[in-house]
Image (tube, rainbow, N blue to C red):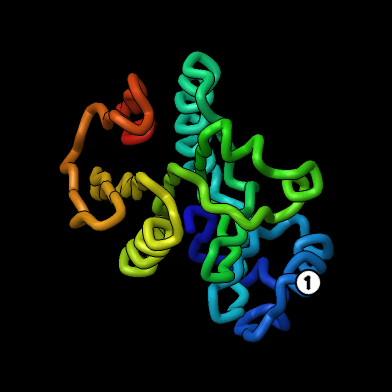
Amino acid sequence: MSRTHSHADQLIPPHLIGLTHVTHEQFEELCAEYPELWLELTSSGELIVMPPAGIETDRRNTDLILQFALWTKKDGTGIAFGPTAGYTLPNGAIRAPDVSWMRREKWDSLSQFEKERFAHICPDFVVELRSRSDRLPTLINKMEEYMENGASLGWLIDPKKRRVYVFKPGEEMVVLENPTVVSGDPLLPGFQLQMEEIWTG
């Protein structure tokens, strides 16, 4: 995830590291107990624990969210979310992408109770922003998991290598080398992610 860094273990309570067979109920309790951490759960019940982001990663993510939120408000066909929105995917994993979006009709299909929890739903669009310590194969597997569970489009952004990995269900991953703009068409008509601020700051 984009929130890890080289001193992560110093910020994570030792008894949380390596927890497996965590139930959804236990996961919600841990989220309430450790609000300063970002938590995820794999489909096999393994707890993934991440400390808060470094400020460079957070700056990039803020620019990404700002660009996407402005498009979302103008477009009006869906709802945008930031990195604290958690989803319970069909395979049982609970994931929180750095940016996500779902069609408004999908959002409207959720009850108020579901909207206030980790809703059993997969967003239509997801973005993960790679940090310095993130392992690329782990993030690629995560993006493929989103596609297998109902997402229609995913971007994995690697600022260090200036690459954007594009994922679509049933298609081969596409790698964009140092793009200046990344287009969300046709799922996100007219959305053009400007990469300059994300690359350089």
Question: Which corner quadrant of the image does residue 26 belong to?
Answer: bottom right
Can you say whether 104 is above or below 53 in the image?
A: above
- Across and down, in percent, residue 76 comes to 53, 19
**Considering the numbered disc 1 on the image, is that residue within a helix, a strand or a loop?**
helix
Could you tell me which residue is drawn at 67 percent across and 53 percent down? 119
Q: Nearer the viewer, residue 155 or 113?
A: 113
- 150 displayed left or right of 181: right
Residue for badge 1: 25
Could you tell me which residue is drawn at 19 percent across and 38 percent down? 178
- 42 displayed left or right of 124: right
- Across and down, in percent, residue 29 comes to 82, 68
- Across and down, in percent, residue 111 comes to 75, 44
**Quick one: which residue is furthest to the top in this view?**
74
Q: Nearer the viewer, residue 124 or 61?
A: 124
Q: Nearer the viewer, residue 182 or 146?
A: 146
Q: Residues within 10 Å of mark 1 (few under 14, many from 20)?
A: few
